[in-house]
Image (cartoon, rainbow, N blue to C red):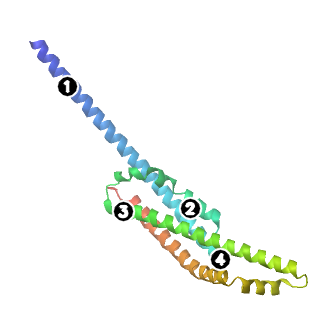
Amino acid sequence: MDQIIAALVGGFLAAGTAWFLQNRLEATRLQRLKQLLIIGISDDLKSSIELYSRVIDEWEKGQIVWFTTLNELRESRQTYLKNRDWMVLVNDEELRQKLFKYYHRSADHINLLENQQRRKYEIQAKLNDVVRDLQLRNNVLVREHALEQAVGLMHAENQELVSLNSITPQGIQRMRDFKGEAKELLDAFSKGNDV
């Protein structure tokens, strides 16, 4: 009988020890995953801050939003996009919500800027085609006069281009806002011990 009791107690001790070790191992693994996630998100935010600055600089220098920079900005978000299910490991609910909103709104804005710039290129390409066609039909027509005629023929596109040119600076201002928001989030991640 003593052997049976000893075997049962030994079994319970072994099971309890195994459960405790497994529990500690899982907690350690989740803590490490959380640390890596925070490092990845922080690196992502640092990269985004640099890319926002580049978009703003490119706009100020040439009044153009480069697709390559927007694509780099979009690609720099892969850590968050691939691991957003694990964001529940961030204890601070307010920080977690801010991060989610930041990524959602800034992704929408990047897409909006890209679509606006693409539409500007399409209008410019159409304008160039119309100017070229006008010059082909009338060999003596100089480019400036052909351009004036083309703009007259493309009234709706001209209005759209004027509108796009007036709202793009607002979009660039939003990029400045997102840059500031990314800095705030980065500061919160670097300061917070209970993130």
Q: Amino acid at mark 1?
A: Leu
Can see residue 133? yes
Residue at numbered disc 4 = 63
> On the picture, is 115 further left or further right than 128?
left
Q: Which mark is residue 13?
A: 1
Q: Which mark is residue 73?
A: 2
Decide which of 165, 195 is in the foreground and name it. Answer: 165
Q: Distance between the Cα atoms at labels 3 and 2?
A: 21 Å
Q: Distance between the Cα atoms at labels 3 and 1?
A: 43 Å
Q: Which mark is residue 148?
A: none
Q: Residues within 10 Å of mark 1 (few under 14, many from 20)?
A: few
> On the picture, is 9 further left or further right than 148?
left
Q: Distance between the Cα atoms at labels 4 and 1?
A: 72 Å
Among numbered discs 3 and 1, the one appearing first in the sequence: 1
Q: Quadrant of residue 20?
A: top left
Report if the CB atoms under discs 2 and 4 are less than 8 Å apart.
Answer: no
Q: Where is residue 169 drawn, in percent x and y?
A: 57, 79
Q: Amino acid at mark 4?
A: Gln
Among numbered discs 3 and 4, the one appearing first in the sequence: 4
Q: Secondary structure at mark 3?
A: helix
Residue at numbered disc 3 = 97
Q: Secondary structure at mark 2?
A: helix
Q: Residues within 10 Å of mark 3 (few under 14, many from 20)?
A: few
**Image: 89 above or below 179:** above
